Image (cartoon, grey):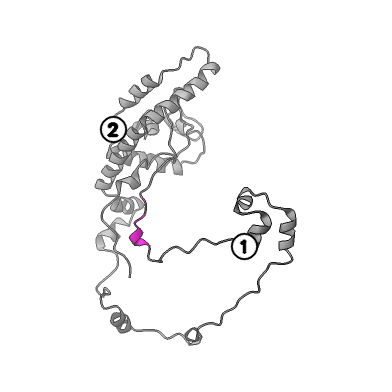
Amino acid sequence: MLREPSARVSKSYFRAPLRGIIDSDGENDDGNYTWDDESPVEDEDPDLDEEGPPPPEPLFDGALLTAVGGVGSIASGVIDAKVLKAMSTDGRSAPVTHEPYDYLQQPYVTRDDGDRQREYPGLYSGAYGPTSRALNAATTASGAFFYFVQPRLWEDIAEASNHYFQEKLDERAQGQYEKQVAREPKRPGYKKKTVEVIRNELQTLPDITARELCVFVGLLIARAIAPNKEKLGNHWKTTDEGGIPRGCFGKFMTRDRFMHL
């Protein structure tokens, strides 16, 4: 019997949902565009495990452990070649076969709905299938997408993203500082900023909003279907760049804001 999906959306699931999904080729000279690979997800509900307890961890044969000198030798990957060569000729057990159950040998008989209802009295027997509203939304790809991604969900994602940004603020500032330190000797006249200055600049960034997330996803889709694989930052060029027309993405979101998201 199918478990009814929960209407509650975990905010931790959407923590940093938009980081690490695009290349960092749009990074500017100050190293302001970085993405964190961490995307913590809440542990799954143990009650959802309907397969029973996990199987016991397989153990090595005692004779093998004695021959190689213990589990430590196996874990290190250093095993005597003579032991491995001997395993090719001995130490193998005879295969064990099992006869199939008798009921599996019987011809298949279709069961009627009454049998299922008698075995599972609480089984749903009413009308089923997609609702008319869902069918109408599914006439277009965008309609199907926004049917499931409701406005409240966008707000939850934005709230979780802002919370994640604050959690990683010190780490992000330190990462940008290290990039600037490495860049300073390569570019005459370039002066690195202090970690505190970088951190203060990051704190002045406005919070992410649900509307910005919608625009961000839309631009990602446009990027995916664009007939080129050039640098991401070229979408904000003020002149035509290869197959990318000028001024497309800039009409909806600035490059710096896009990279921040």
Kind of residue indicated by mark 1: Gly
**In the foreground, 72 or 249:** 72
**In the foreground, 14 or 143:** 14
> Which quadrant: the C terminus?
top left
Q: Is residue 159 above or below residue 204?
A: below
Q: Is residue 157 above or below residue 51?
A: above
- In the image, the segment drawn in magenta is 43-49
Q: Which mark is residue 207?
A: 2
Identify the residue at image location x=28%, y=39%.
159
Asked whether, in this view, residue 216 is left or right of residue 55, the answer is left
Label 1 SS: helix
Return the residue found at the far top: 189
Q: Return the residue at label 1.
A: 62
In reply to whether residue 45 is colored magenta, the answer given is: yes
Q: Earlier in the sequence, mark 1 or mark 2?
A: 1
Kind of residue indicated by mark 2: Asp
Label 2 SS: loop
Where is residue 227? Give x, y as percent: 49, 41
Where is residue 251? Give x, y as percent: 34, 32
